[in-house]
Image: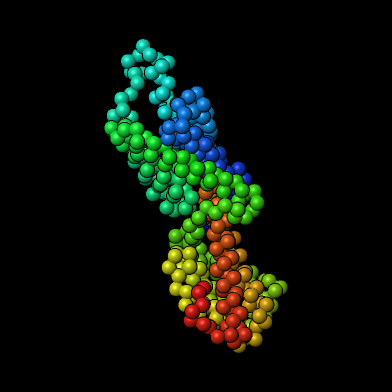
Amino acid sequence: MANSVVSTETVAKLLDTNANPAPLGLMGFGLTTVLLNIHNAGFYELNAMILAMGVFYGGVAQIIAGVMEWKKNNTFGTLAFTSYGLFWLTLAGIWLFPAVFSEAGAAAKPSETSLAWYFVFWGLFTLYMFIGTLKLNRALQVVFGLLTVLFFLLAVRDFGGGAVWGKIAGWEGILTGLAAIYTAMAQILNETYKRVVLPLGPISQLPRNFVQEYGEEIARMWLEALRASPQTPSYGVVSDEELVGASEFALQQVQEYFSGKPSEADIGSFFHKLGATRAAQGLPLPELVSAILLLKREIWMTARTHGVWESAMDLQRAVDLNRELGRFFDRAVYYATAGYTGYPLRPKDVF
């Protein structure tokens, strides 16, 4: 008989309790961008104030934020903040090197054409970063979309478009900086007040294939919680097979709801029929509601257990997702209660 090997290896996940560095990076970028583009719009000359902001707040602060994002396993945040922090340092170098190293030919003042190409490639970089924001939130989409336009406007100016394009870029850059400042403020205020003070426009959805990967586990944990809960003693009359089947179908409705393609009539009909079935089985209405809310809890706890959300940006999405889960199950309770009490299912009801 072959020897069996029992693994005693344990994988531990540590909860990241470090602060969210994104507001620091966004504010460093936003304030510096606004102040530079007030200059581009023609309100004052390029001066030491802009250079100092570019080096220390736009540059160093963003690099610090990028390193902190790396520790939080946020690849997007790491690349964005470190790259734009170094952008500000290179821009300050472009302004300063010709004066500091006036005798070195390699440090000569760049031509407008070379600067134009500099902005073109930063624009291309920002464009693909913008594509990444399509999975994040609307506020970041606005910031990166406006920044992409800004870089190309500056390129047009330096390719020979003239001062008018510089002024257009200045005003557009002010909007870009203000968008970044808004995003930073929203993250800070929402976290401080534990509610949505300034909306970020979340794209709330369950991770792809979440139900396929963890559906059986959620159904099993829900069944165990249901059997053990003192709030659902009457569920002993319902077989395990029926309960597991109902939970798996409900989980699929949750996945479809968050996929952006919900079949609202099917979801409402399912919970309405479920309520009627539990009434016919003689289960008390409070126990039906408790069972539905237990399923919501098991979905959330499974997501946390498996580290579905690990980075700072993911955690922000998780907060938004929790709110959407609440909305889904609020409606589920409504339809189940309606079915339980015999209230008719209205076709025009929106789940």
Position of 12 relative to 259 (above/below): above
In this rendering, position of residue 236 left or right of residue 43: right
Is residue 231 at least partly visible in the picture?
yes
Residue furthest top as drawn: 103
Foreground of the two, 160 or 230: 160
Q: Position of residue 281 (x, y in %)?
A: 62, 86
Q: Position of residue 11 (x, y in %)?
A: 56, 50
Q: Is residue 51 shown above or below 252?
A: above
Give percent across and percent down for residue 287: 66, 77
Residue 59 makes an appearance in the image: no
Tell me the residue at 48%/52% (across/down).
137
Residue drawn at the location 42% of the way across and 15% of the way down: 100
Horizontally, is 62 left or right of 297 in the view?
A: left
**Residue at the location (54% across, 78% down)?**
271
Quadrant housing residue 338: bottom right
> Residue, x 62% and y 85% (percent of image)?
341
* Front residue (pair 247, 263): 263
Against 325, residue 101 (above or below) is above
Q: How many marks?
A: 0
Colour scheme: rainbow
Instruction: Tell me if residue 89 comes above or below residue 153 in the rendering.
Output: above
Q: Nearer the viewer, residue 146 or 317?
A: 146
Q: Where in the figure is residue 172, as x and y percent of width and height?
A: 42, 41
